[in-house]
Amino acid sequence: MKRYFLLVALVIVFLFAYTFTLAQYISLSFLLDLLPHNIAVYFLIGFLWLLALVIVIVIVLKQTYAYKKSHWLIILLLNPILGVLLYFIFAREFITRRFPKTRPLIAAKAFLGLEEQTTVDYGKRDYGNIFRFIRETTGRAVYQDDTMIEILNNGDVFFPRLIAELEQAKKYIFMEFYIIKTDIIGSRVLDILKAKAEAGVDVYLIYDHLGSNRYLNNKYMRTLAAAGVRIGVFDPQTISVFNSNLNFRNHRKATVIDGVVGFIGGMNLADEYNHGSSRFGFWRDTHILARGNGVTSIQNVFVKDWYYITAEVLDYPMDKTVVGFKGLAAFIESGPDYENGLIRDVYLKMFHDAKKSIKIVTPYLIIEPEMLAAIKIAVKSNLAVELLVPGKSDYALVGHATRSYYEQLLRLGVRIYEYKDHFVHSKIFIVDDLVASVGSVNFDPRSFHLSFEVTTIFYNHAVKDLVQSFHNDLLVCREIVLEDWMRRGPIKRFIQGLLNLFSPLF
């Protein structure tokens, strides 16, 4: 029944767009017939068409791949008026030209100077070239034998550890989430922040306006601020043609406590991430806890975000206690503010250096041509490529868009697993069961290019735990087999084909 409802909804959307476009041309023609000598009408029509033409020229001249431009060209061609409006709201570049005056430290990449000046024997370490690439490409430090990583699977593990560490805070707490809700688990954590602030601990909290604002009790948030919690809101949003940053969100989930312990991963601060959703029930997700010198890099990401929001530089000395934990670790960010595509590029390097296997866990799968080529080369090089995605999606359209890639991946030889009847929100990338990434990054263009993201890349004993978790997840997955997948109905084929066509816009 749901698939028929979805098909009807898509037809309605298509008819609405077609009717709107047709009405636009009829109305303009009617105005011309009614007021053939009215200069204002001609001026308005000419201005709109000229604006659409200018936007088309701007898009054509962009130094980027054709597939990233063609969708907007089609929209502007079919409906110039609506296309101009949508482009100004959703498709403009992230504005950085004012950064040299408004945010000079970001423009100069000064925060990279806060990174540890580490010495790493890249040539003597397995997969050292990946970490050399990270250092040279991102400017972020690579930590050798001094940073512990612990895998935290699901909210029932993550939240107790987070709360326990927060309760031990003595000097400062830095916390940012894409989504914060004042629900049961959210209020419990925020109450700790409030109590710590009242006790004299410096507490800084960042949330994304688009991700969080509708879930927050404003009266409660005012009590936090009154208690001394410093709150930064990332790009407060209104839908406007004058707002160029609507499409760029802070998707990071990062916490640092006293410079000693840090958390990053996929979980936000809300009940559903703690298995408290009536819709989803069990929620599969992954976070990491870090101790040691590597926490410096997590803190630097937060300090930069706070500066972006407030123009204030936070200067808190780091704890330099060395934690003996063999291996390599790096904490890297990406975003449209001079960091665009860095995590994507590191992933491509990991594909290139893989020797045996690739494992990917992602809630949303929209594959760019570069990634599809990397997957194809990996499979043709006899690497085992496995992909784990949700069996139940939080957004139906995105779920169908994810499945629109199944056929070509299966034909390449990729093994695809769906988490039975549940949603998996983990963002994991594992190479040869030895090098891994865990963070906030989905396997889609939005995470790679539009959102502010953070992840950790590590080569140490914690990867074993991550691989074991992957194999445990496979026990509750169903494998998608090409022969069975080809028997799906024509309605599903049409929906998936349509969504695949526009998936780069998601």
Image (spheres, helix red, strand yellow):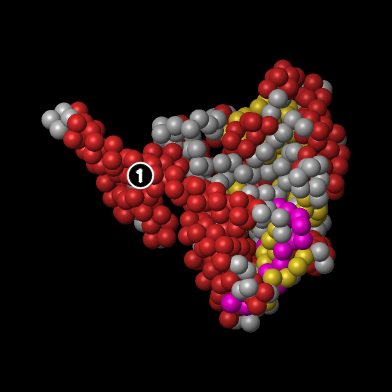
Q: Quadrant of the N terminus?
A: bottom right
Q: Residue at horizontal 82%, vertical 24%?
A: 195
Q: Residue at horizontal 75%, vertical 52%?
A: 285
* Residue 72 falls inside the magenta stretch: no
Residue 164 is situated, as x and y percent measured from the top left of the image, at 86, 39
Whether residue 183 sits left or right of residue 31 in the image: it is: right
The three-letter code of the residue at mark 1 reads Thr
Residue 315 is situated, as x and y percent measured from the top left of the image, at 65, 33
Residue 204 is situated, as x and y percent measured from the top left of the image, at 69, 30
Q: Quadrant of residue 228?
A: top right
| Residue with the mark numbered 1 | 21
Q: Range of the magenta residues?
A: 409-432
Packing grade of label 1 (10 A; few <14, some 14-19, many >=20) is some
Whether residue 176 sits left or right of residue 201 in the image: it is: left
Can residue 354 be seen at all in this image of the molecule? no
Whether residue 143 sits left or right of residue 102 in the image: it is: right
In the rendered view, tell whether residue 229 sits above or below residue 484.
above
Helix, strand or loop status at disc 1 = helix
Q: Residue at horizontal 55%, vertical 51%?
A: 8
How many marks overall? 1
Q: Residue at horizontal 68%, vertical 22%?
A: 218
Given residues 353 and 336, the one toward you in this image is 336
- Of all residues, the one furthest to the top in this rendering is 226
Q: Quadrant of residue 493?
A: bottom right
Q: Quadrant of residue 146?
A: bottom right
* Residue 430 falls inside the magenta stretch: yes
Given residues 296 and 79, the one toward you in this image is 79
Given residues 190 and 254, the one toward you in this image is 190
Residue 111 is situated, as x and y percent measured from the top left of the image, at 57, 42
Can residue 485 be seen at all in this image of the molecule? yes
